[in-house]
Image: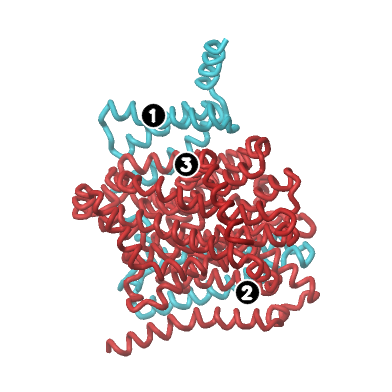
Chain colours: A cyan, B red
Amino acid sequence: MEKENSSAGADLVIPALALAFVVYFFVSTAELAWEAKANAIVIGTVLVLLTIAQVVRIVLRLASRRANLGVAVLWEPRDVVWKRLGMVAVTAAFIAALPWLGLTLSLWLGMLAALWIMGLRRPRILVVLPLATAGSCYALFIAVLDAGFPRGPLEALLGSLLRFGGA
Amino acid sequence: MTWQFLADQFATQFGLWWVIWPGILLGIVVGILPGFSPQNTLIMLLPLTLAVPVEQAFAFMIALYCANHLAGGVPAILVRIPGSGGAAATTLDGYPMARKGQAQQAIVLSFTASVFGGLITTLATIALLPWLSQLGLYLRSVEMVVVMLFGLTLIAVVAAKDALKGLIAGFFGLMIGAIGTDHIYDTPRATFGFLELYDGVPLVAALIGLFAISEALVMIEEKLIVTEDARERAMRSTWADTWEGIVITGRKWWHITWTAFIGLFIGIVPGAGASIAAFVAYQQSRMWSKTPELYGTGIPEGVIAPESANNGVTSGTLVPMMALGVPGGSTAAVMMIVLQYHGMVMGPRLFTTNPELAYGVFVSMAVAYIFMILTILPLARYMARIVLIETTYLVPIIILVTVVAAFVERQYLFDMGLALIFGVIGYIAHKTNYHVTAMLIGIILGPLFEQYLVRSLRLSEGNLMILFSSPLANVLWGLLVLSLVVPLVRGWKRRVSRS
């Protein structure tokens, strides 16, 4: 059940995204054969009707002053907003750095930064936990599964050391 | 088929313990980690399964497949991140149980319900195989469209507290599932110009984003997943808690049985899969319960129903493959490739030309379930300790490791970025009660839904009324409407009786 005076603006974010996507889908497939767009027309039409119903419901709540157009619910509690944004930023930076630094080094740095953002300051854990995570991922994804992750300087070094050891 | 034949089959399969056990262990690992699907693991292991005799290859694949379905419930219970779509319904009561300090009991319930549900349906399949194989033939493209809409509606109504929001999330998911090239002309649609989306939205990236990343972003708000009281209780957990889970399972044997059969019947329908089966079982369990209002608060029945059903699916999925040559899901399709490589021709003749293999597959499944319960039950106590780890450590590990796992399916960096985007969408959905489960199931069903819808429309030259042209489809439409109306009427009655 909705809370009294709840942030109805936040309730509109998902319907707005859905509606924008439906419009994009319809516009970008307007020239295609009917078979290529029939599915989207059926689903999109239902989605638009559902969205309208939700908007009407919110308007009624606004009219009876049981809600406001705020989006505060997305930011609460305020004291962890920076942690949350920090985690998203670190993840984006980790993905961006992966092609240059390789999986192991970028994951080690990413984990280190993420733990720091989460408020951890104990040096031993800050070194050991990222090392263990990056090491496990190296062992599983590169050494065992040979998945196609980008190789960086560390993988090149470890690869040549292992080859040297093997020879 | 004689008793002697069956006894020989069981003896043969027990003799393959050295193949079954590694399959179970690998299946458990693959099931727990979101991002690793059984079909991908089997594809990676094709050089192995193609090299060994067909009986050994199949025993290994079956063990891995069943263990994967069983283990998907573990992260669903502990951190509300299902290992696969089939375990999504387990989060509804499994996670609240973990938060109450009953993680160990919930995991034991999930294991025992999965194993007994899987075992019962496997034995039933062995007995009823010739009749069950006919079931899938009654469902044509028109009925399949309604089955999928019915499944999605149930999920929206069951999983979300607000049915309208659940439906918006579900249909948004279906719409996202339509991204990619169309089935007839291969024309790209709504790909935002990315070549990586021509094959559609990668399901692993969607699963990781909507569940793992979004959940971790919400988890930041708390120091621990569990409350302080629950933490104290979890710290004091003993083997008696494992026993308590087993006792509850014993008491609920009938519940396990009938929900497992829901899984079996839905598994036979090609494409319907474990995710729909688990939600239908959950909804039916709630509907017939004397205390439906307790569902979602962390009760054993809410864990038993979906777990039993998603393992009931395992034997159901193989029925159309063995009897008709039509794989019931992607894992079954990989298994079929291995069988065909070994010169086996699927279809009704398999039961007369090679009954050892035809029935042996299901006997192998029954044996795998017996081995599984012995392997995994003692681990429940130690797995449950994960809820005691502080979120300071848990959040970075969940986010970064699952983002890495998003790469594994297709090996595109793009998928990692997509997982992050889905994570942010999932976080907004979490905060505003648009249920991410409905969205994910929509994305999973999207491509299949389009395939059946377009096929139906081509038959009727674009006339939508074909969707109401068959008696079976109309019955399903009726059930769909009922599933929307009944909760409304119940809610209204409750409000009236309260006032």
Q: Which residue is mark 3?
A: B25
Q: Nearer the viewer, residue B367 or A42?
A: B367
Q: Eyeballing the image, is B69 above or below B465?
A: above
Chain identifier of the residue bearing label 1 in the image = A
Q: Secondary structure at mark 2?
A: helix
Query: Hey, what amino acid is under mark 2?
Result: Val
Q: Percent position (x, y) of residue B245?
A: 31, 58
Chain identifier of the residue bearing label 2 in the image = B
Q: Percent position (x, y) of residue B301?
A: 36, 67
Residue sitting at x 67%, y 62%? B320
Residue sitting at x 28%, y 50%? B222
Q: Nearer the viewer, residue B146 or B53?
A: B53
The residue mark sitting in front, 3 or 2, is 3
The image quarter in which residue B283 lies: bottom left
Q: Eyeballing the image, is B328 above or below B194?
A: below
Q: Which residue is mark 2?
A: B146
Q: Which residue is mark 1?
A: A132
Discs 2 and 1 lie in a common subunit:
no
- Crowd around label 2: few <14 · some 14–19 · many ≥20 (10 Å): many
Discs 3 and 2 lie in a common subunit:
yes
Q: Secondary structure at mark 1?
A: helix
Residue sitting at x 76%, y 46%? B343
Q: Which numbered circle lies on residue B175?
A: none
